[in-house]
Image (spheres, rainbow, N blue to C red):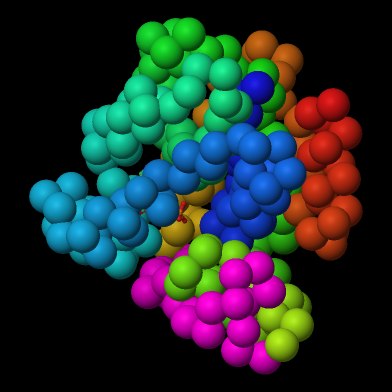
Amino acid sequence: MNIILLGPPGAGKGTQANRLVEERGMVQLSTGDMLRAAVKAGTPVGLKAKAVMDRGELVSDEIVSELIDAELTAMDAGTGAIFDGYPRTRAQAERLDELLDKHGRKLDRVIELEVDEDALVDRITGRFTCANCGAGYHDRYNLPQVEGVCDRCGSTDFKRRPDDTEETVRTRMQEYRAKTAPILPYYEERGIVSRVDGMASIDEVADKIDALLS
Ligand code: AMP
């Protein structure tokens, strides 16, 4: 099964993708994660992308599509893919169709997480992840059970994204409204779009997604 999780920053795409990876053995293909890894490693792609990401703008379609192509090439054909944060433009959506075709895959479902934008700033500015395993937490809504210790792997090392500031979040939302939301009709024509209320609790959103995938 191949699915796209669509929604503005902070909608919960990463959280749900993480869970699907754990529970269903799918692979999460997050272009944001791939770009952050490239920035950290100081690769040519990372050097090019860093300033754009810090401003909250979109990296070029070619760069992110190449990253996805490489991941799909490395993946086992029978493993399901969760596209998280890709595609973000019409050109990427068209390119993804070509890539899926090339890798003998078909898109089963596009799940849009619908959220209230004002609440997103609150969500995003409080979030942090385990630096070791990537488990997601939040200062106000989802702290580790033991303070300072990751529930999943026991690490005591956590990190925050440099682009999770209020100003950058506003730019990222504007980019979503202007460039990403308009790709929904492209998938609606095929009757594969489902909408889920992303303001519900993590477990409720998970149940809705599970029902869509069963
Ligand atoms: P994310 O982790 O999905 O919120 O992405 C973080 C940042 O990486 C975005 O604000 C963009 O600058 C960049 N980025 C991630 N995915 C894409 C994409 N598919 N197209 C363009 N830029 C992207």
- Image check: 129 left or right of 137? left
Dominant SS in magenta: loop
Q: Position of residue 9 (x, y in %)?
A: 55, 57
Residue 4 appears in the picture as rendered: no
Q: Nearer the viewer, residue 113 or 77?
A: 77
Residue drawn at (45%, 58%), measured in percent from left and top? Answer: 172
Q: Position of residue 16 (x, y in %)?
A: 68, 50
Quarter of the N terminus within the rendering: top right
Q: Nearer the viewer, residue 174 or 42?
A: 42
Q: Position of residue 5 (x, y in %)?
A: 62, 39
Residue drawn at (15%, 53%), measured in percent from left and top? Answer: 43
Q: Write down the region rendered in magenta.
A: 147-170
Magenta-colored stretch includes residue 167: yes
Residue drawn at (63%, 51%), measured in percent from left and top? Answer: 18
Q: Nearer the viewer, residue 173 or 75?
A: 75
Looking at this rendering, what residue extends furthest in the bottom direction? 147
